[in-house]
Image (spheres, rainbow, N blue to C red):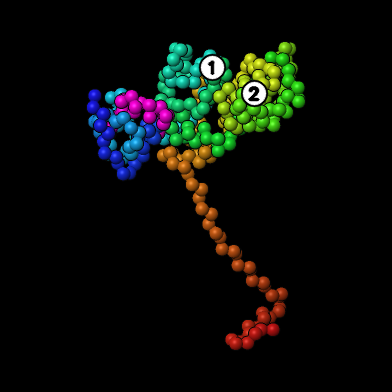
Amino acid sequence: MEKTPPPPSPEGDRIAKVLSRAGIASRREAERMIAEGRVKVNGKVIDSPALNIGPGDRVLVDGKPVGEPDPPRLWLYHKPAGLVTTAKDEKDRPTVFGALPPEMPRVMSVGRLDLNSEGLLLLTNDGALKRRLELPSTGWLRRYRVRINGTASEASLERLRAGIEVEGVRYQPMTVTFDRQQGANAWLTVGLREGKNREIRRAMEAIGVTVNRLIRVSYGPFQLGNLAEGAVEEIKQRVLRDQLGVAPEGATARPKPQRRRKPLAAPEKTPPHGAKPPRKAPSGRKGP
């Protein structure tokens, strides 16, 4: 099959960004799809993501046209344990996306929860929003309920609060609260802002305990609350705008400029009853 890239458009967005915004795939996945020859622009297969797409360009993925991107949307999903957070699994394990309700549009996960982790997972149809929420610079605290086998001393928890290095990987300081002992297990509440792969499990192993249950209960301002396991709940557009400044068309809403108000003129003093008002000084002379 001929793979000739069409002439680049001087304006518009990169093809990977267009596919990501349209909810087809993440930018990295879109680049892989392009390399596999699954993307056509204006009737020609492309093999490089170094291409800008303009309003008049026609894009096909696997023979299906890519429409205009929908407004950015965000959902809360209560992930059960036993599902992998990937579209396709090489071991053929059940996936998060295969378990979603059939009426859901094509979505991407904001970050991941591993196979045995459960709780709050954010889903979005917008690649730019996904990327923004995953950036460390967003700085949102992610809180987890963590059940460990055994118990942890305050001294060992202080190691986590100060930041810990495990096998050459440096983990940023965590917020850790000891909640209660429950038989052979103990419950902790852990908060972190970085979220590296299996960070909590590896950090706990470094202080001599094993995680046997891990539940994410919040991601920034978004809470798991009473959302049932396996259930999905969409965030209202008003909340999305308030929390993220996301406008309906996907642009970041700019704060309205503050108008400078003119100071109010001081009210004229009314002379006492019966008194004559002060005489104005003639021009060129100063008053008393």
Residue shown at the point (57%, 27%) measured from the top left: 196
In what quadrant of the picture does the C terminus appear? Answer: bottom right
Residue at the front extreme of this rendering? 168
Visible in this render: residue 111? yes
- Seen in the picture, residue 201 relative to 253 is either above or below; the reply is above
Q: Examine the rendered structure and indicate whether residue 99 appears above or below residue 33.
A: above
In the displayed structure image, the side of residue 109 where residue 178 appears, left or right: right
Residue located 64% across and 71% down the image: 268
15 in the magenta segment: no
Which residue is under mark 1?
Answer: 115
Q: Is residue 32 magenta?
A: yes
Q: Which residue is mark 2?
A: 203
* Residue in the foreground of this view, choosing between 174 and 32: 32
Q: Secondary structure at mark 1?
A: loop
> CA–CA distance between discs 2 and 1?
18 Å
Mark 2 vs mark 1, foreground winner is: 2
Q: Amino acid at mark 1?
A: Leu
Q: Secondary structure at mark 2?
A: helix
| Callout 2 touching callout 1 (CB < 8 Å) | no
Q: Amino acid at mark 2?
A: Ala
Is residue 225 visible to us here?
no
Q: Earlier in the sequence, mark 2 or mark 1?
A: 1
Query: Residue 209's spot in the image, x, y percent?
Result: 68, 17
- Which stretch is magenta? 21-41
